[in-house]
Image (cartoon, rainbow, N blue to C red):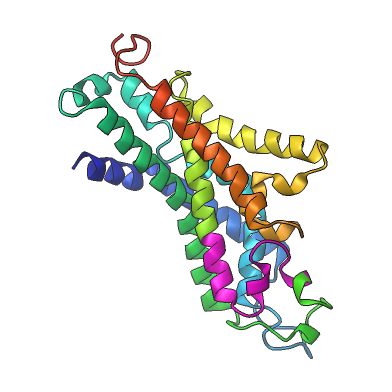
């Protein structure tokens, strides 16, 4: 029951709705910037030259920059809010501390994942409705080899199963959002400012990306979980290993760092 109430609180709040609206706005701005809004191809070009799948990919270019913040906005600071407003002490009168933390952890992960996956899905619904729903033959594109069309992770599915390719990227987006939302919640035992909880995952993605670039390993940047076609060498390993490590470390921090009998956290 508490889990359902928390989930309803997360998905019906203005933070979640605002995150969706901002994400969709960025996708449409990116589409407008990098792809023709008019689906009619130039004279002499293949009818599917402008298609739903390429249009969707172009819409992700700007959204990627905002994604960590979109993941944390809905619920990552919920524990911090409940703690600082004294609500936790009343919640613990009705349920065990571990059950409360587990429920908040799960809802936060779901909200963060959905905050990324839902706008990606809605945007695909738009491009699928407006643009051609098939890909042109390779000879009608600027590319000379199939891998150039959609390089990197899942790229081999793009030309043969483009719908499956989009679904795969949306699922990966969900996992990205869940991971970064968990990172945000992991900061709750150590800070009292919700803006730190919301902003640190965003800063972390950029700092981590900068470090792996300096080390000559840009493909390991977690940014490519949302844009695997932005770098040729992205694979399932380079995408899921960093996300898994970050998720595990954040989860351990939550369940070890948030303690029931801490005067600095609940009973102050």
The residue nearer to you, when weighing 110 against 33, is 110
Residue 185 shows in the view: no
Which residue, as the protein is rendered here, is positioned at the far bottom?
A: 44
Indicate the quadrant containing the C terminus: top left, top right, bottom left or bottom right. Answer: top left
Image position of 140 (left or right of 176): right
Indicate the quadrant containing the N terminus: top left, top right, bottom left or bottom right. Answer: top left
Give coordinates of residue 87: x percent, y percent. Answer: 25, 23
Give coordinates of residue 167: x percent, y percent. Answer: 52, 67
User: Does 172 appear in magenta?
Assistant: no
Q: Residue 83, located in which quarter of the rendered image?
A: top left
Q: Residue 155, located in which quarter of the rendered image?
A: bottom right
The majority secondary structure of the magenta stretch comes to: helix
Give coordinates of residue 57: x percent, y percent. Answer: 64, 65
The residue nearer to you, when weighing 36 against 240, is 240
Residue 203 against residue 47 in the figure, above or below: above
The residue nearer to you, when weighing 19 against 1, is 1
Residue 237 against residue 198 in the figure, above or below: below
Image position of 229 (left or right of 174): right
Residue 212 against residue 148 in the figure, above or below: above
Residue at 32% across / 47% down in the picture?
A: 12
Residue at 30% across / 13% down in the picture?
A: 261
Image position of 26 (left or right of 193): right
Task: Give the residues in magenta.
Answer: 148-170
Which residue, as the protein is rendered here, is positioned at the far left?
A: 94
Residue 144 against residue 181 in the figure, above or below: below
Residue 111 shows in the view: yes
Residue at 33% across / 9% down in the picture?
A: 263
């Amino acid at each position: 029951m508490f889990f359902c109430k928390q989930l309803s609180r997360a998905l019906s709040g203005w933070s979640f709705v605002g995150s969706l609206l901002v994400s969709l706005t960025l996708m449409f701005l990116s589409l407008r910037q990098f792809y023709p809004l008019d689906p009619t191809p130039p004279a002499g070009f293949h009818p599917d030259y402008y298609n739903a799948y390429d249009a969707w990919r172009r819409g992700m270019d700007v959204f990627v920059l905002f994604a960590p913040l979109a993941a944390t906005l809905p619920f990552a600071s919920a524990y911090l809010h409940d703690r600082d407003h004294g609500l936790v002490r009343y919640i613990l009168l009705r349920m065990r501390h571990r059950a409360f933390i587990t429920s908040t952890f799960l809802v936060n992960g779901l909200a963060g994942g959905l905050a990324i996956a839902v706008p990606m899905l809605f945007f695909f619904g738009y491009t699928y409705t407006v643009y051609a729903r098939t890909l042109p033959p390779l000879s009608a594109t600027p590319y000379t080899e199939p891998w150039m069309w959609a390089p990197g992770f899942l790229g081999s599915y793009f030309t043969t199963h483009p719908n499956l390719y989009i679904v795969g990227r949306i699922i990966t987006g969900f996992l990205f959002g869940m991971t970064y939302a968990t990172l945000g919640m992991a900061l709750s035992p150590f800070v009292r400012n919700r803006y730190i909880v919301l902003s640190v995952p965003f800063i972390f993605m950029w700092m981590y990306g900068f470090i792996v670039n300096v080390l000559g390993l840009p493909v390991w940047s977690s940014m490519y979980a949302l844009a695997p076609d932005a770098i040729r060498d992205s694979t399932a390993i380079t995408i899921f290993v960093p996300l898994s490590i970050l998720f595990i470390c954040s989860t351990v921090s939550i369940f070890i760092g948030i303690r029931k009998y801490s005067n600095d956290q609940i009973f102050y």
